[in-house]
């Protein structure tokens, strides 16, 4: 309940400030979180250390991750009020939107795969405004009020949400109807840990199987999509080339699944290396740390 109250207070404040004032407020709060949350600071630092082993300014980059997360929350809580087509014209550069239509023209649906990078929530809403509304697969927060708050923000801007634990049947039907399913594919944080161990960013990591399974069972293309922040707090929405399944079958081996995952994981890895301080990962990430 404490976290829910903090989010509600933050939402109340940032909606009443100018965007510049909201960013300043978020930066102040984020700096406090950076200094006082040893656990989160250590997790972010260690993640960056493994991505950027020779970087001399890791503490600065670590604090930048916290600040980018603060901005992410500002945009998430304001998007129901501000996000429209004029916002897209003024703040968003769109790259390769034709890739989405190209994938849908096959009639087998699209699995949008992204990462905890930039502002993935805003990216899903932008797709909806551009005429490609996704159904987002999301883990339910352990605090129901927080979960409801986030889902209300998503649905207010045209993004339907299906809880991860109920996703398989619903998502397969959506894809068969040539719809769009959106999944964050850079880490399996589910309770039952049914992901597959993969090499990612130079380390072993538990990666969710869902996007690969959806694609391999239905023939849907996987389209990596990322919304990353620029220095002036505008964004670039990039729709990467579709990745098509080599086989379509009900019975899948771990080898077939891993091969498909590796294809889009390389794209995610490249984006994270390009924008490491926008990778908003505040938990132990690598498999050796996870098991310890």
Image: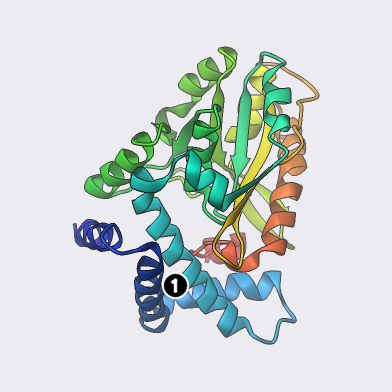
- In which quadrant of the rendered view does residue 175 lie? top right
The residue located at (52%, 48%) in the rendering is 120
The correct choice, above or below, for 255 with respect to 269 in the image is: above
- Location of residue 132 in the rendering, given as x and y in whole percent from the top left corner: 55, 28
Q: Secondary structure at mark 1?
A: helix
The correct choice, above or below, for 42 with respect to 194 in the image is: below
User: What residue sits right under mark 1 in the picture?
Assistant: 40
Near mark 1 (Cα within 10 A), the count class, few <14, some 14-19 or many ≥20, is some
The correct choice, above or below, for 37 with respect to 173 in the image is: below
The residue located at (38%, 59%) in the rendering is 74
- Residue nearest the observer in this picture, 137 or 123: 123
- Residue nearest the observer in this picture, 277 or 236: 236
- Location of residue 3 in the rendering, given as x and y in whole percent from the top left corner: 25, 60
Give the side of residue 242 with respect to residue 236, left or right: right
Furthest-right residue in this view: 246
Colour scheme shown:
rainbow
Residue 187 showing in the rendered view: no
Give the side of residue 215 with respect to residue 39, left or right: right
Residue 110 showing in the rendered view: yes
The correct choice, above or below, for 74 with respect to 95 in the image is: below
Give the side of residue 152 with respect to residue 196, left or right: left
- Quarter of the image for the N terminus: give it: bottom left
């Amino acid at each position: 309940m404490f976290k829910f109250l903090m989010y509600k207070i933050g939402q109340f404040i940032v909606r009443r400030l100018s965007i510049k004032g909201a960013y300043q407020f978020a930066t102040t709060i984020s700096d406090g979180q950076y200094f006082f949350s040893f656990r989160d600071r250590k997790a972010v630092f260690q993640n960056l250390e493994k991505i950027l082993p020779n970087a001399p300014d890791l503490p600065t980059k670590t604090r930048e991750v916290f600040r980018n997360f603060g901005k992410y929350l500002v945009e998430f809580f304001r998007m129901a009020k501000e996000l429209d087509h004029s916002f897209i014209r003024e703040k968003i550069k769109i790259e390769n939107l034709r890739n989405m239509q190209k994938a849908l023209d096959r009639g087998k649906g699209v699995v949008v795969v992204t990462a905890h990078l930039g502002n993935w929530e805003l990216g899903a809403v932008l797709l909806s405004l551009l005429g490609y509304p996704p159904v987002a697969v999301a883990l339910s927060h352990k605090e129901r009020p927080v979960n409801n708050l986030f889902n209300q923000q998503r649905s207010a801007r045209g993004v339907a949400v299906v809880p991860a634990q109920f996703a398989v049947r619903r998502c397969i039907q959506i894809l068969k109807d040539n719809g769009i399913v959106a999944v964050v594919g850079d880490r399996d944080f589910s309770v039952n840990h049914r992901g597959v161990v993969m090499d990612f960013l130079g380390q072993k990591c538990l990666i969710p199987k869902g996007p690969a399974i959806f694609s391999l069972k239905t023939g849907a293309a996987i389209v990596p999509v990322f919304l990353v922040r620029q220095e002036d707090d505008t964004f670039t929405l990039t729709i990467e080339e579709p990745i098509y399944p080599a086989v379509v079958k009900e019975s899948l081996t771990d080898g077939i699944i891993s091969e498909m995952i590796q294809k889009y994981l390389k794209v995610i890895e490249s984006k994270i290396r390009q924008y490491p301080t926008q990778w908003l990962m505040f938990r132990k990430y690598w498999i050796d740390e996870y098991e310890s």
